[in-house]
Amino acid sequence: MKTLMKFYLQEYENFDEILPASLQSNEEPEVENIKEFPNEAYADTWRRNKEDAKQLLGYLPILSAKNEKEKKSSEFKELARETFHNSIKFLLDPLFQGDGVDFNIDDKDIWFFPRISTIICDWPEACTFSLTYKSANSNYPCHFCLVQREDLIDIRKEVILRNHVNMKEYFDSNTSNLAVLEQVNNYFWSIPNLNIYAATVPDRMHHLDLDLFKYQIEFTMELLKKKKSLNKVNKRIADIPRHSQLKVFKKGIQLSRLTASEYRDMMKIMVFVVDDLQIEDLSEVYVKWNEMYLLSRSEKFKESDLKNFQKAINDWGDLFIKLFQNISNSYLKFLKLHSWIYHIVDTIREYGAINGYTTETYESLHKTYVKIPYRLSNKKEVEKQIMENINKKQ
Ligand SMILES: [Zn+2]
């Protein structure tokens, strides 16, 4: 089992709604208040994700600010980050103390040594773990490397990768801000064999279907409007005959709240509907997208496959940037484009295929073990009721 432990982390920043009233109503963000919240109230749950996977479910305390001003202050933000890392320490330290852990599996005692291999999460959570600033407008906005914001789409530039050694130097000399890091001790520096700046693995569905492809569709619409071809394309889409397993978009390209599966249906048709419009490279960018997308779904990569994948990414990236750079308000300076081009192949090399990584399982755990029990409770002594409810289920 390569991954002995995968992290449960689900939108911990949006936990406000599930916080006990005793914490929600706090006016002072006093550290003492945290004690009222039962860190120890984590449930050990046996639940199938993949074969013998095991989930350690933890509830994390969230500080509440007395007002908006305080919430936005740098002191408060730093305290919130520190609280997160202290809570994670509280939850995980027992795993790393002593000489490993004995587990009884199928009536046999099996000794194992726990390690954290990957953390599946989206960009804001990755910033929480790596303690980089959350703003995409900071000078070095990438949690993997020290690329300058100005160079985000310069896709052949050398970058310096972040690691424990170079980042801790900034912390030790009290100059974390120079590397766009919070001046907070990072708990993960103490975990063996883990580079927290690289171990956060993007969820493929969010990264590709709902992010990069969504941008590609939006920019395409802008381009079509400029070239007065949008109506033509929408008519072509509306004319596509019904076919099982293919959603029909009778109103043409729509941007409002498409699901990942609807975006995948668009991938199947876009190459054809933007063909032959006298817009250079437009249908080519969709061809390149599809080539890259198919490779991203591979279950296994040999070194030669990774080279082909990187080439497919670069070929798509070059065209995407050429076509849409002037349409994007930020000149395409967005992080997921950079991290996809620069870091995804290394991530696969280190941690394996990305196809299996999805936060969906964890999202459903969050619903079953946090949201629903909270709703079922009478909102008083919530944590106790949540635990009782979960125990009943087991
Ligand atoms: Zn980077």
Image (tube, rainbow, N blue to C red):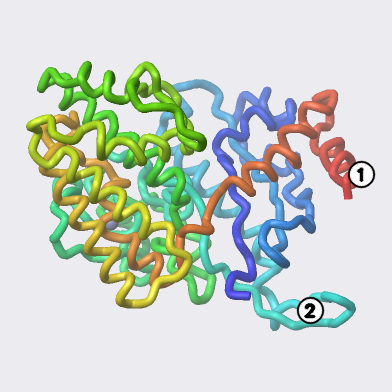
Q: Position of residue 283 (x, y in %)?
A: 19, 40
User: Is the residue 121 above or below the residue 248 in the image?
Assistant: below
Q: Which mark is residue 392?
A: 1
Residue 158 found in image quarter: bottom left
Residue beneath the point at 34% across and 60% down: 344
Question: Left or right: where does residue 300 sit relative to residue 25?
Answer: left
Judge the density around disc 1: few (<14), some (14-19), many (≥20) Cα neighbours within 10 Å. few
Q: Please, what secondary structure does the residue beneath circle 2 have?
A: strand
Q: Nearer the viewer, residue 103 or 48?
A: 48
Image quadrant holding the N terminus, namely: bottom right
Q: Which mark is residue 48?
A: none
Look at label 1 and name its amino acid. Answer: Lys
Q: Nearer the viewer, residue 63 or 299?
A: 299
User: Is the residue 269 above or below the residue 359 in the image?
Assistant: above
Residue beneath the point at 89% across and 78% down: 107
Q: Earlier in the sequence, mark 2 or mark 1?
A: 2
Q: Please, what secondary structure does the residue beneath circle 1 have?
A: helix
Q: Position of residue 52 (x, y in %)?
A: 72, 67
Alpha carbon separation for disc pair 2 and 1:
26 Å
Question: Left or right: where does residue 196 sit relative to residue 278?
Answer: right
Find disc 2 in the rendering and name its residue: 102
